[in-house]
Image: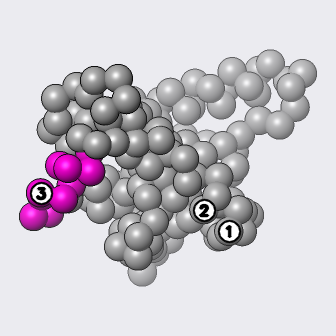
């Protein structure tokens, strides 16, 4: 099995263990991020359900972007070119994710109406509890696969 399928498969397995979408993707890349499991799980813990359960930006995408930053992000605040290069690559990755999935937003990916302020988590939890099959495992696996492909071709 190659690295790409390993990250994708691992992201799905981590989600099945109970990690949120962001955690699942970030943790799947611990072999190349250098971040230990506990720290990665803590860092990504606030981003499940679309940033704190708000239903906004998909946690799988957020986890992938965190991994992207850890692997190839800029570190020198004075290096404006590196900062802009990474910002453009992060945007490019988000565009790829949106093109494949149809949206960047959790609530849209779950086919929910736009949540009222503060109601995102309640709507997401109700929806997921009623679904026979959550789309989230597919999303975390897709985000991990896309990130591997992106790292191989864009950096």
Q: Reply yes or no: does residue 144 show up in magenta.
A: no
Q: Which of marks 2 and 3 is in front?
A: 3
**Label 1 Cα crowd, 10 Å radius (few <14 / some 14-19 / many 20+):** few
Vertical side of 14 occupied by 126: above or below: above
Q: Give the range drawn in magenta.
A: 124-133
State the SS at label 2.
helix
Residue for badge 1: 38
State the SS at label 3.
helix
Residue for badge 3: 130
Give the spatial CA distance, label 2 vs label 3. 27 Å
Of residue 30 and residue 85, the one placed in the foreground of this image is: 30
* Residue 148 in sight: no
Residue at x 80% of width, y 19% of height: 80
Q: Position of residue 133 (x, y in %)?
A: 14, 63
Of residue 37 and residue 51, the one placed in the foreground of this image is: 51
Residue at x 60% of width, y 46% of height: 66
On screen, residue 24 versus residue 114, left or right, reads right
Q: Earlier in the sequence, mark 2 or mark 3?
A: 2
Query: Do the residues bearing badges 1 and 2 touch, measured as CB atoms within 8 Å?
Result: yes
Residue for badge 2: 41
**Label 2 Cα crowd, 10 Å radius (few <14 / some 14-19 / many 20+):** some
On screen, residue 88 versus residue 117, left or right, reads right
Give the spatial CA distance, label 1 vs label 3. 31 Å
Q: Position of residue 45 (x, y in %)?
A: 55, 54
Quadrant where the N terminus is found in the figure: bottom left
State the SS at label 1.
helix
Of residue 101 and residue 52, the one placed in the foreground of this image is: 52
Q: Earlier in the sequence, mark 1 or mark 3?
A: 1
* Residue 111 in sight: yes
Q: Which residue is the extreme one toward the bottom?
A: 1
């Amino acid at each position: 099995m190659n690295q790409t399928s390993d990250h994708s498969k691992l992201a799905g397995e981590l989600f099945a263990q109970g990690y949120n979408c962001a955690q699942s993707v970030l943790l799947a890349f611990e072999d190349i991020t250098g971040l230990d499991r506990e720290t990665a799980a803590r860092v990504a813990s606030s981003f499940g359900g679309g940033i704190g359960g708000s239903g906004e930006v998909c946690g799988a995408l957020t986890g992938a972007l965190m991994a992207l930053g850890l692997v190839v992000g800029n570190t020198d605040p004075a290096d404006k070119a590196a900062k802009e290069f990474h910002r453009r690559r992060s945007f490019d990755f988000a565009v790829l994710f949106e093109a494949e999935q149809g949206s960047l937003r959790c609530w849209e990916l779950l086919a929910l109406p736009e949540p009222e302020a503060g109601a995102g988590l309640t709507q997401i939890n109700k929806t997921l509890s009623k679904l026979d099959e959550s789309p989230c495992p597919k999303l975390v696996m897709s985000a991990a696969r896309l990130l591997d492909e992106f790292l191989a071709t864009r950096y």
